[in-house]
Image: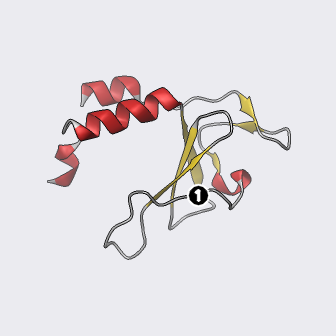
Amino acid sequence: MDRIKARIRATDGIRRVDGGRIYNGMPARELGTEGWHKPWSGGNGGNCVEAMKLSDGRVAVRHSADPDGPALIYTPGEINAFIEAAKAGEADFLLS
């Protein structure tokens, strides 16, 4: 868990095509409607995490039940660290 906490930090500083800055917690609707995927959907009635790869390589994440809500923005390294740690069982505590 400490490894996940240490490596998962959202960042900002890149500007959108329309000139606005892409930042952690921004309204997801400002990133558009195209390109969102539900890689982690399951039998939960459609409420799941959606992710979008941004043109600069970062990844935006939002809750599918609130597509206009906040987007969390992660670097490729942060997403890689999270996925690798989850594969290694470091997030299993979330399942119990």
Q: Position of residue 43 (x, y in %)?
A: 31, 73
Q: Secondary structure at mark 1?
A: loop
95 relative position to 83: left or right: left
For this orientation, the residue located farthest to the bottom is 45
For this orientation, the residue located farthest to the left is 96
Q: Position of residue 33 (x, y in %)?
A: 68, 61
| Above-or-below relation of 10 to 70 | above
Residue 45 in view here = yes
Q: Quadrant of the C terminus?
A: bottom left
| Above-or-below relation of 16 to 41 | above
Residue drawn at (38%, 58%), measured in percent from left and top?
Answer: 40
What's under tag 1, amino acid-wise? Answer: Trp
Q: Position of residue 79 (x, y in %)?
A: 44, 35
Residue drawn at (27%, 40%), measured in percent from left and top?
Answer: 86
- Res 59 → quadrant: top right
Residue drawn at (21%, 35%), measured in percent from left and top?
Answer: 88
**Residue that carries the numbered disc 1 in the rendered image:** 36
